[in-house]
Amino acid sequence: MPTLIPTSQGPLVGRDTPRVFIGYDPREDVAVNVLADSIQAHASTPVQIAQVRLSQLGNVYRRQHHPLQSTAFSFSRFLVPWLAGYEGWALFIDADMLCQGDIAELWALRDPAKAVQVVKHQQQCEPGLKFQGMPQSPYGRKNWSSVVLFNCNRCRRLTPEYVNTASGLDLHQFRWLEDEAIGELPAEWNVLVGVQPVPAGARILHYTLGGPWFDDCQTMPQSDRWQAARAAMNHPLSLPEPSRP
């Protein structure tokens, strides 16, 4: 049961509070923190944010690292409904993103008729390498799972046992659901930087090819926006002038 913050008008934090899980990779510490701060900075309501860290999952997550996975959370993201107790809703977001919109607006798009909601990219790419020499693997429904709004009770098939044993394509292509249970989110909530044009109204920028926190991705498009967000998070406090005798 979430902690409630009482106000004169009733609880401010409760079942309708956006609940966000960010994928964690130890190479992207700074990216995770900038993303979390950008979510909070633009939110009009309280937001609960957690990280999906393998070090905190103990023996629950037992998959061996696959040579084609580019991040530590490639498959552990599908444990989010289990982490949420299969109750309510939860939003999963990749670490390599920057929030530019009010997450409460995304949260308001929850459709109880759907088990998940995603931006249904039609991304075409060639096999190769991306950030830090990580593999770029083409497959159908690529990047659908990078922002997922989970209706947790309808995702009970995602048990730890299933997540540990299902194929990568079964998980990322949502083969554990009927197609009609996969709802759609507006495209501005997962804009693929360097892959597609960035609209003026982009709500979430996704540095899927690598972000400026990596040495080999300093010149990626939209790097200035991420650098500005990092600088805003670390702005120095103004100190009073020392008094003179």
Image: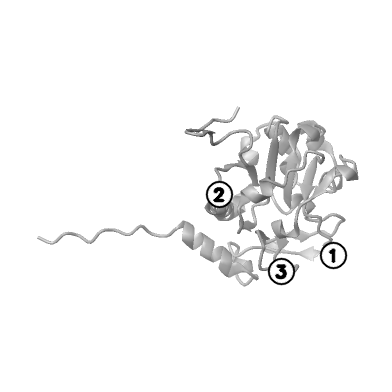
**Residue positioned 72% across, 41% down in the render:** 76
The tag earlier along the polypeptide, 2 or 1, is 2
Secondary structure beneath dot 2 equals loop
Pinpoint residue 42: horizontal percent, then vertical percent.
56, 54
Please identify, in this view, whether the residue under mark 3 or under mark 2 is nearer the observer: 2
Q: How far apart are marks 3 and 1 (CA)?
A: 13 Å
Count of marks overlaid on the render: 3
Would you say the residues marked 3 and 2 are in contact, meaning their CB atoms lie under 8 Å apart? Answer: no
Q: Which mark is residue 44?
A: 2
Q: Do we see residue 204 in this rendering?
A: yes
Residue annotated with mark 3: 194
Can you tell which quarter of the image residue 209 is in? Answer: bottom right
The tag earlier along the polypeptide, 3 or 1, is 1
Q: Do we see residue 25 in this rendering?
A: no
**Residue positioned 80% across, 65% down in the render:** 128
Q: Distance between the residues labelled 2 and 1?
A: 35 Å
Q: Residue 159 carries which label?
A: none
Please state which amino acid type lies under the numbered disc 2: Ser
Pinpoint residue 153: horizontal percent, then vertical percent.
76, 32
Label 2 CA crowd tier, 10 Å (few <14, some 14–19, many 20+): few
**Residue positioned 84% across, 64% down in the render:** 124
Please state which amino acid type lies under the numbered disc 3: Gly
Q: Is residue 236 left or right of residue 169?
A: left
Residue 63's place in the image compared with 30, above or below, is: above
Q: In this view, does 61 lie to the left or right of 3?
A: right
Q: Quadrant of the N terminus?
A: top right
Label 1 CA crowd tier, 10 Å (few <14, some 14–19, many 20+): few
